[in-house]
Image: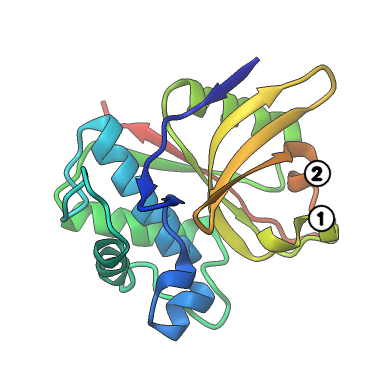
C-alpha cells in the first residue's frame, strides 16, 4: 500500500529550503520555521486556510524567504535549536493564532513511543490529508546523518511486507527512508512527531 500527499513546488524545488535564507542563523537553524512555512502553504492549497501572504499560485524563492523571515520570531533559531515538540507547537500555534487561524490543532507523539505507534500515526495523518512535522535529534546511524538534529515534513508512506517506508520532504527534495530505522535513533533523548488536526 502506498500513499503520497500532493505537494507544491517553489520554482524547481519541492517545498522550502533553509539554505536559501540570507540570514546566517536561519540557514543554520531555520528547519523548524521551514516545516511551519511549508505546512502553511500546504494548508492554504489543500485545506482552504489563508496563511501564506503571497501568491500561492506562483510561489517564488524570494517570497518564500520573506515568509520565512515572518515565521522567524515564532520559531527563532537558538543555541539548542527547536529541540522539543512543545517549542514547535507553542511557536507555530502562536503564529496561527496571530493570523486568525482557528482551524488547526496540534498534538505531540513522543519519539519515546514504539515505532508501531509512529507508523499508526503516520498512516492515519496521511490518509486524512495532513503532513507531519518530524523532529529527529541525534542519530547513531550515519545513513540518517542529513536528518540529524533536524525538523522536516513526512508526506507519504509505503507499507511493504516487513517495513514501512516514509517519504520526507526537506532541503527542497524528496527522500524515502525506512521508518523503523529513522525512529530508532539509538539515543535516550528523542524528538517525535507533531500531529495536525482540524478543530471541530
Query: Residue 73 occupies which quadrant of the picture?
Result: bottom left
Of badges 2 and 1, the one in the foreground is 1
Please give left or right for residue 150 compared with residue 54 in the image: right
Q: Residue at x 84, y 61 (%)?
A: 142
For the point 38% across and 59% down, the residue is 90
Residue sitting farthest toward the front? 12
Tell me the distance, in whole angstroms, between the alpha carbons under discs 2 and 1. Answer: 9 Å
Q: Secondary structure at mark 1?
A: helix
From what the image shows, is residue 165 above or below residue 35? above
Residue that badge 1 annotates: 143
Report if residue 30 is visible in the image: no
Do the numbered discs 2 and 1 sit on residues whose CB atoms are within 8 Å? yes
Left or right, residue 156 beside residue 13: right
- Residue 124: % across, % down: 53, 23
Q: Residues within 10 Å of mark 1 (few under 14, many from 20)?
A: few
The picture places residue 85, in percent across and down from the top left corner, at: 52, 55
Q: To which residue does mark 2 refer? A: 181
Whether 51 is drawn above or below 120: the answer is below
Is 44 above or below relative to 4?
A: below
Q: Quadrant of the N terminus?
A: top right
Amino acid at each position: 500500500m502506498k500513499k503520497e500527499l500532493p505537494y507544491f513546488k517553489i520554482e524547481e524545488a519541492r517545498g522550502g529550503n533553509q539554505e536559501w535564507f540570507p540570514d546566517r542563523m536561519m540557514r543554520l537553524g531555520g528547519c523548524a520555521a521551514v516545516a511551519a512555512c511549508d505546512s502553511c502553504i500546504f494548508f492554504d492549497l489543500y485545506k482552504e486556510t489563508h496563511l501564506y501572504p503571497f501568491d500561492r499560485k506562483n510561489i517564488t524563492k524570494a517570497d518564500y524567504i520573506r515568509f520565512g523571515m515572518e515565521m522567524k520570531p515564532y520559531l527563532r533559531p537558538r543555541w539548542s535549536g527547536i529541540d522539543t515538540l512543545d517549542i514547535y507547537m507553542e511557536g507555530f500555534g502562536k503564529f496561527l493564532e496571530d493570523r486568525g487561524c482557528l482551524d488547526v490543532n496540534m498534538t505531540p507523539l513522543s519519539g519515546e513511543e514504539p515505532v508501531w505507534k509512529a507508523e499508526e500515526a503516520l498512516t492515519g495523518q496521511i490518509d486524512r490529508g495532513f503532513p507531519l512535522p518530524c523532529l529527529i535529534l541525534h542519530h547513531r546511524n550515519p545513513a540518517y546523518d542529513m536528518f540529524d538534529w533536524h525538523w522536516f515534513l513526512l508526506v507519504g508512506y509505503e507499507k511493504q511486507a516487513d517495513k514501512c517506508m516514509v517519504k520526507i520532504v526537506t532541503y527542497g527534495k524528496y527522500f524515502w527512508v525506512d521508518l523503523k530505522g529513522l525512529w530508532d535513533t539509538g539515543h535516550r533523548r528523542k524528538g517525535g512527531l507533531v500531529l495536525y488536526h482540524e478543530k471541530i
